[in-house]
Image (cartoon, rainbow, N blue to C red):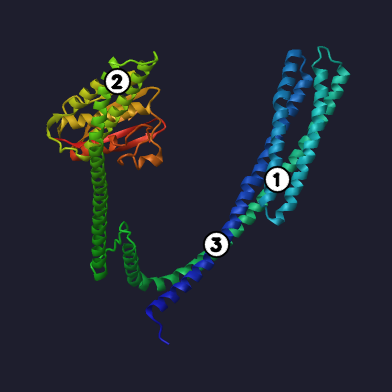
């Protein structure tokens, strides 16, 4: 039975995979065993041997100090030597013994079964050494109490020192025996590990050569034929799913390479076109929403303005009549005038809202002329400074040294800046700092309005520039939407930059003249 090309390649790779898998499993197993051996030696036996050597060194030094203590006649020096022994030697011995026991406990967690007996023996010896050390410390305390006296009794001091030196000799012999046992066992394990590594290396080399020979036979045809085809299939699948970011990157001059380059070019073109369509669709939807909102706003404002004018006129006439009217009660006149004043304020407020709605619905096209954006910013900051300072807001500016020429309608830009400054003031009811920065970046003028308020909540950021959306209790939700219309009518853009609990930054960009 004839096998297809794909089947033959599959079978060849299956053999390669099985061969390399067997080699890998063998190597991983032996590597794991080698790592355990290294860990057993480095974290276990070598560390224990080092601890035993340190204990032996400490014990020899202490034995020498005890011998010098026997011959020391100066009381001050004797007391100083005793104090040093109590402060350093005992603490160091305790620490070293605890570290050695901790090492044996860690070794029990990963040591192979054949090593458990030796580890238990080492742990038993350390515990015996710890018990002897407790008895030695008691003997040392008794000897030190006698030697710390101004005129110790010679026979008692000699007896205590003899007992102390006997205990030190016993401890030294035990530690030395433990150290020798650890070093001998460590050398034995090192030799076994080296021999195992040598055998494992030979076996891995032989199996690897076999696997490489099998792999070379299967790779020759597959590398030249199937790899470009598979890459093309994957690339086409990604493009069909709408993923245009990945590149095929097939080099060469054959038909597959040419087709791959054409596919890459098509993917780039589709990605650019899709991005442009998304931007245009978003702009179209925003324009449709604004147009609908504008029509509704104009209709509502038109229907409200005439009744408001009539109400306001009648309230004024009624106020004039109240000036000459008489009331049966003394408080009747002031109360009536207070109520009429409240009505007048509400009528004025609603009239102001209708004017804002009309601005949103009938925003005139900007009258563009050459202006210095730095001068406009300085003028608006100066105009707003008193109002901001009454709200305990300090204002600072960072402006370039020279002029920043733009094509702008000064009146409309002033309206944008005033709106942002007042929003910043409202965001800092307890006071704060407002910084206005202007800089030139390439072919753009960038204006940043930074406040130290609580920032804009993430769920609010996406709706900041929607008409009639506001987080203020008495806000209209028109200011930022109107500002966005004005800035975009100037060929620029406006958006929220950084926003955190330390404040917010609104960024505007205008093309330089």
The residue at 29%/36% (across/down) is 478
- Toward the right, the furthest residue is 155
Distance of label 3 from label 1 (alpha carbons):
29 Å
Indicate which disc residue 357 carries.
none
Residue sitting at x 61%, y 46%: 42
Q: Would residue 266 appear left or right of 32 to someone viewing this image? A: left
Measured in 3D between alpha carbons, the distance from the residue under mark 2 to the one under mark 1, in whole angstroms, is 74 Å
> Disc 2 or 3, which lies upstream in sequence?
3
Asked which quadrant contains residue 507, the reply is top left
Q: Which residue is mark 2?
A: 387
Residue 73 appears in the rendering:
yes
Question: Residue at the location (76% across, 25% down)?
Answer: 66
**Residue assigned mark 1:** 105
**Earlier residue among tags 2 and 1:** 1
Q: Find numbered disc 2 in the image and state the secondary structure of the residue it sits on.
A: helix
Q: Determine which quarter of the picture holds residue 127.
A: top right
Q: In this figure, which residue is indicated by the disc labeled 3?
A: 27
What is the residue that sits farthest to the front in this orientation?
Answer: 328
Q: Secondary structure at mark 3?
A: helix
State the image coordinates of residue 269 (x, y, percent, origin top left): 23, 58
**What is the distance, in whole Å, between disc 2 and disc 3 at their CAs?**
78 Å
* Image quadrant containing the C terminus: top left
């Amino acid at each position: 039975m004839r096998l297809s090309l794909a089947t033959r390649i599959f079978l060849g790779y299956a053999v390669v995979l099985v061969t390399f898998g067997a080699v890998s499993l063998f190597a991983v197993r032996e590597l794991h065993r080698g790592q355990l051996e290294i860990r057993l030696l480095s974290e276990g036996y070598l560390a224990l041997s080092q601890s035993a050597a340190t204990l032996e060194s400490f014990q020899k030094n202490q034995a020498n100090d005890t011998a010098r203590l026997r011959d020391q006649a100066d009381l001050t020096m004797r007391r100083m030597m005793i104090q040093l022994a109590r402060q350093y030697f005992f603490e160091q011995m305790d620490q070293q013994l605890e570290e050695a026991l901790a090492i044996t406990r860690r070794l029990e967690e990963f040591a192979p079964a054949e090593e458990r007996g030796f580890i238990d023996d080492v742990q038993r010896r350390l515990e015996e050494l710890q018990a002897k050390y407790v008895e030695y410390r008691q003997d040392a305390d008794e000897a030190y109490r006698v030697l710390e006296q101004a005129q110790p009794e010679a026979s008692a001091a000699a007896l205590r020192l003899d007992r102390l030196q006997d205990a030190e000799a016993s401890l030294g012999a035990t530690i030395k025996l433990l150290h020798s046992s650890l070093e001998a066992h460590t050398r034995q394990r090192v030799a076994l590990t080296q021999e195992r590594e040598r055998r494992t290396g030979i076996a891995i080399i032989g199996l690897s050569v076999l696997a490489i020979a099998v792999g070379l036979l299967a790779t020759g045809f597959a590398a030249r034929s199937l790899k470009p085809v598979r890459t093309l299939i994957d690339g086409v699948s990604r493009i069909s799913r709408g993923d245009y970011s990945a590149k095929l990157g097939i080099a060469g001059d054959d038909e597959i390479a040419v087709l791959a380059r054409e596919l890459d070019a098509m993917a780039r073109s589709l990605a650019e076109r899709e991005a442009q369509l998304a931007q245009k669709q978003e702009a179209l939807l925003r324009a449709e929403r604004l147009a609908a909102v504008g029509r509704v706003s104009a209709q509502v404002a038109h229907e409200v303005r005439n009744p408001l004018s009539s109400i306001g006129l009648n309230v004024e006439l009624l106020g004039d009549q109240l000036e000459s009217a008489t009331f049966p009660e003394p408080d009747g006149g002031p109360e009536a005038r207070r109520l009429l004043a409240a009505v007048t304020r509400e009528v004025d407020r609603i009239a102001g809202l209708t004017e804002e709605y009309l601005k949103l619905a009938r925003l005139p096209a900007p009258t563009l002329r050459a202006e210095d954006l730095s001068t406009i910013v300085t003028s608006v900051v100066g105009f707003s400074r008193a109002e901001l300072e009454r709200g305990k807001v300090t204002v600072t500016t960072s402006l370039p040294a020279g002029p920043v020429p733009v094509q702008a309608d000064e009146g409309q830009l002033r309206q944008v800046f005033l709106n942002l400054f007042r929003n910043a003031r409202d965001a800092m009811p307890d006071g704060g700092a407002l910084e206005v920065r202007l800089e030139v970046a390439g072919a753009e003028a960038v204006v940043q309005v930074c406040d130290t308020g609580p920032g804009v909540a993430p769920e609010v950021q996406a709706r900041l520039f929607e008409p009639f959306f506001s987080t203020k209790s008495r806000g209209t939700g028109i200011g930022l939407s109107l500002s966005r219309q004005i800035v975009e009518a100037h060929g620029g853009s406006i958006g929220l930059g950084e926003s955190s609990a330390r404040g917010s930054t609104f960024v505007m960009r205008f093309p330089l003249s």
